[in-house]
C-alpha cells in the first residue's frame, strides 16, 4: 500500500522541475557573451586557441570554452628612464608612446605574449632603443636635436617590433632633465661667457673713447683755439698786457 501523500509528490516534482529549468537557463546564459567595441575575444577550448571573435554577441560551449578579452584600442605608455649621452653624461628622459594591437593579429599576439605584451615586449624594447639612440649624441646637442632623437627612437622601435602585432602610432620625448653637476657646469659657463662679453664691451668702449679723445686733441690746432677764443670774446680789450700778440680770453 502506497502511503505517499499525492500533494507531497507534486510538490517534490515541482521543485525538481524548477531546479532543472533554472539549470537550463544558467547553462543557456553561459553560452553567450559580448565583446565590446574596440576589443577582440580570444576563444580557448581546453586551453587551445580555436578562434578570435569580433565585437557583439557571441556563442561558446559551456565548461569547454574560455574567452580572453583583448583591447585593440590605442594605448598610451609613458616610460621614464635614465640614459647616458656619448660624453657619459646622465640624462633623465620621459618618453610617451601611443600604440595599438593589430586586430588581425590578436591571436598571434596572445599565443606569443599572452595578456602581458606591454611588459614582455614593449617596455624592454623601448628602453633599449632609447638608450642606444641617445648614446650617440653629446649632451650639449640634446635639446637642439630632441625632435631628431625622438624620430630616430620611433623608427628604431617600430622596426624592432614589426611583425609582432604592435602598431606604433606616435613616439615623443616629452620631458628631460640633466644631472645637477651638468646644470651647474652650464650655469658657470654662461656666467663666464657673460663676464667675457662684458669685459669685451668695456674694452671696446674704452678704445672708442680713447680714439675720440685723440681725434679731439688733434683737432685743437692753434688756429682752432684762436677761433674759439674770438667766438667767446665779449668785445672788451684787456686793461693790461705786456706786449706781443694781443691775448684773447682763455677758453674754459
Image (cartoon, rainbow, N blue to C red):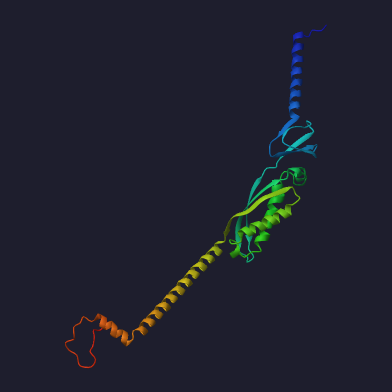
The spot of residue 179 in percent (x, y) is 57, 61
- Report the residue that reaches farthest toward the left: 239
Please tell me which residue lies in front, 191 or 104: 104
Q: In the picture, residue 247 is in which quadrant?
A: bottom left
User: In the depicted view, which residue is nearer to us: 158 or 87?
Assistant: 158
Residue drawn 69% across and 48% down?
Answer: 118
Drawn side of residue 243 relative to residue 89, left or right: left
Image quarter of the N terminus = top right
| Quarter of the view holding residue 211 | bottom left
> What residue is shown at x 60% (from left), y 57% (from top)?
92
Q: Position of residue 187 (x, y in %)?
A: 51, 65
Give the side of residue 189 with respect to residue 99, left or right.
left
Q: Is residue 144 above or below residue 123?
A: below
Q: In front here: 47 or 141? A: 141
Visible in this render: residue 5?
no
The residue lying furthest to the right in this view is 1
Name the spot of residue 108 as percent of width and height, x first.
77, 45
In percent of width and height, residue 228 lies at 28, 82
> Does the rendering let one see residue 17?
yes
Residue at 39% x, 79% y: name it. 212
Please tell me whether residue 225 is drawn above or below residue 95 in the rendered image: below
| Residue at the bottom extreme of this rendering | 243
Quarter of the picture containing the C terminus is bottom left
Looking at the image, which residue sits at the far top? 1
Figure check: 210 above or below 194: below
Up the image or down, 40 lies above or below 7; here it is: below
Count of marks placed on residues: 0
Amino acid at each position: 500500500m502506497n502511503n505517499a501523500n499525492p500533494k507531497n509528490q507534486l510538490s517534490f516534482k515541482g521543485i525538481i522541475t524548477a531546479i532543472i529549468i533554472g539549470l537550463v537557463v544558467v547553462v543557456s546564459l553561459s553560452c553567450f557573451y559580448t565583446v565590446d567595441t574596440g576589443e577582440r575575444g580570444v576563444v580557448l577550448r581546453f586551453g587551445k586557441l580555436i578562434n578570435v571573435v569580433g565585437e557583439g554577441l557571441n556563442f561558446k560551449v559551456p565548461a569547454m570554452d574560455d574567452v580572453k578579452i583583448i583591447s585593440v584600442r590605442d594605448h598610451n605608455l609613458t616610460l621614464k628612464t635614465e640614459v647616458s649621452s656619448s660624453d657619459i653624461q646622465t640624462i633623465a628622459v620621459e618618453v610617451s608612446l601611443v600604440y595599438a594591437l593589430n586586430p588581425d593579429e590578436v591571436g598571434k599576439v596572445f599565443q606569443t605574449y599572452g595578456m602581458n605584451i606591454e611588459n614582455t615586449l614593449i617596455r624592454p624594447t623601448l628602453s633599449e632603443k632609447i638608450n642606444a639612440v641617445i648614446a650617440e649624441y653629446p649632451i650639449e646637442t640634446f635639446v637642439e636635436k630632441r625632435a631628431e632623437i625622438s624620430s630616430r627612437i620611433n623608427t628604431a622601435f617600430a622596426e624592432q617590433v614589426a611583425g609582432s602585432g604592435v602598431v606604433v602610432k606616435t613616439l615623443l620625448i616629452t620631458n628631460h632633465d640633466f644631472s645637477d653637476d651638468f646644470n651647474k657646469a652650464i650655469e658657470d659657463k654662461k656666467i663666464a661667457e657673460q663676464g667675457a662679453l662684458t669685459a669685451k664691451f668695456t674694452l671696446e668702449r674704452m678704445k672708442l673713447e680713447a680714439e675720440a679723445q685723440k681725434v679731439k686733441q688733434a683737432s685743437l690746432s692753434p688756429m682752432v683755439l684762436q677761433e674759439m677764443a674770438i667766438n667767446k670774446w665779449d668785445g672788451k680789450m684787456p686793461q693790461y698786457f705786456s706786449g706781443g700778440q694781443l691775448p684773447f680770453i682763455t677758453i674754459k
